[in-house]
Amino acid sequence: MAATTLQKHVKKDTTKATTLLPVLICAVALPLSMLMWIGNLAFSFFTVDANAIYHEDGFVIPPTRWLVSVITPLVVAAWGLRKKNLVISGAILGIFVGFVLTLTSYSFLMCLMTFFVSSSKATKFRSERKRKVEENHTEGGQRAWIHVLCNGGMATQLAFLYMLDSGCGERPINFIKDYRASWLSLGILGAFACSNGDTWASELGTVVGHAEPFLVTTREKVPKGTNGGVTIPGLLFSLLGGTVIGLAYYLSVLYFVDSNILAASPPQWPLIFAGAFAGFVGSLIDSILGATLQYSGIDDRTGCIVEHAGKGIHHISGVQLLDNHSINLISTIIMGLFTPRIANILWP
C-alpha cells in the first residue's frame, strides 16, 4: 500500500514538472532574447549609420528572430533529454549550436533538426542487435558533447562566417549574385548531409538485410561493425540520409524566402541532389578513413568489434590513429569544403 502511494506521488511530481517545463523555458527565453535584441540595437547604434535601412539581413536582427533562436534550442534540448537522445553535456553544447544556426538562418535550423531527429531514430533502431557486434554502441542513441561537436562543429563555424559576412536571414542559392552566402550555405548543407548519410549507413546498414559487409579499400569480407566495412544497403542509406537533409533545406528555402526573390534566382531543386551527393561521398570518405586510420579487431571473448589492440583480439584492419569522433569531424570538414565547390561548378 505504501509503495503504491509513493508511486502515485512520484508520478504526480513528474507530471507537474512536465507541465511547468514550458513555463520555465519561456521564463528564460523571453528576457534573454530581449536582452540580446537590446544589445544588438545598442551595438548597431554605435557602428551603423543612422540612415541605414532596418532589415533582417543587415546589422539589426528583429526581436522575433532572437526569441526563436533562444527558445527553439531550449525546447529541442529538453525534448532530447526527456527522450534520452542527449545527455547533459550534449544538451548544453547543443543549445549553443542550435542558437547559432537558428539565429543565422532557419534553413540551417531545418538541417540541424532533420539530422538530430532522423539520426537519433536510426541509432535506436534495433539497438539490441548492434550491441552484440559493437563494443562502444551508444545505449539509446544518447549524444554527449563530443558527438555534437564532431557532427555540428563544422556547420556552426560556417554559420558564424555566414553571419559575419552576410548577416542573418534566409537567402536562395545564387553563386553569380551572392557567391559567399551561397558557398557558406552549401558548406553547411554538405556538413550535415555528410553526418546524416554516414549515420544512416552505419546505424541502418548494419541491421537491415543479411549481406556481409566488405572493406571499402580492399573489398575483403569483414564482420559487421568493422570500421570501413560497407554494404550495398548501407551505401543506399547514406544516399537517402543526405537526400533528406537536402530536401529539408530546399523546402525551407521555398517557405522562408520571398517568392519575388525566388523568381529572380536560379532553380533551387539542386539542393536535394547536393545533399544526396554529400551524404554518399561523405560516407565513403568516412569509410576510407575508418578502414585505414582506425583500428578494428575482433574480441575472441565477446565476439564484438573493438578499436584497440590487446590480448585475445585479432586485427582486422586499420591502425590505431583516429577514433570515430575524429573521423566524423574530418569527414564533415572535407564535405563542408568540397560540396560548395562541386555545387558551384554544376549549378544550372
Image (spheres, helix red, strand yellow):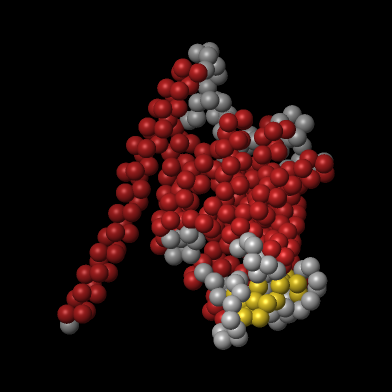
Quadrant of the rendered image containing residue 122: bottom right
Numbered-mark total: 0
The image shows residue 210, relative to residue 264, as above or below, that is below
Quadrant of the rendered image containing residue 170: top right
Q: Residue at 43% of width from left, 42% of height from top? A: 70
Where does the N terminus fall, quadrant-wise?
bottom left
In the current view of this chain or complex, which residue is farthest to the left? Answer: 2
Image coords of residue 22 (percent x, y): 35, 51
Where does the C terminus fall, quadrant-wise?
top right
Image coords of residue 111 (percent x, y): 60, 50
Image coords of residue 288 (percent x, y): 74, 63
Q: Nearer the viewer, residue 143 or 316?
A: 316
Q: Nearer the viewer, residue 108 or 325?
A: 325
In the current view of this chain or complex, which residue is farthest to the bottom? Answer: 301
The image shows residue 273, relative to residue 263, as above or below, that is below
Instruction: Using residue 139 as the reference point, say whether residue 208 is left or right of it.
Output: right
Q: Residue at 58% of width from left, 31% of height from top? A: 164
Instruction: Using residue 79 as the reference point, say whether residue 114 is left or right of it.
Output: right
Q: Residue at 58% of width from left, 59% of height from top? A: 325
- The answer to whether residue 255 is visible is no
Q: Nearer the viewer, residue 284 or 279?
A: 284
The image shows residue 79, relative to residue 42, as above or below, that is below
Quadrant of the rendered image containing residue 259: top right
Q: Residue at 52% of width from left, 57% of height from top? A: 146
Instruction: Using residue 23 as the reference point, say whether residue 42 is left or right of it.
Output: right
Image coords of residue 23 (percent x, y): 32, 49
- The answer to whether residue 329 is visible is yes
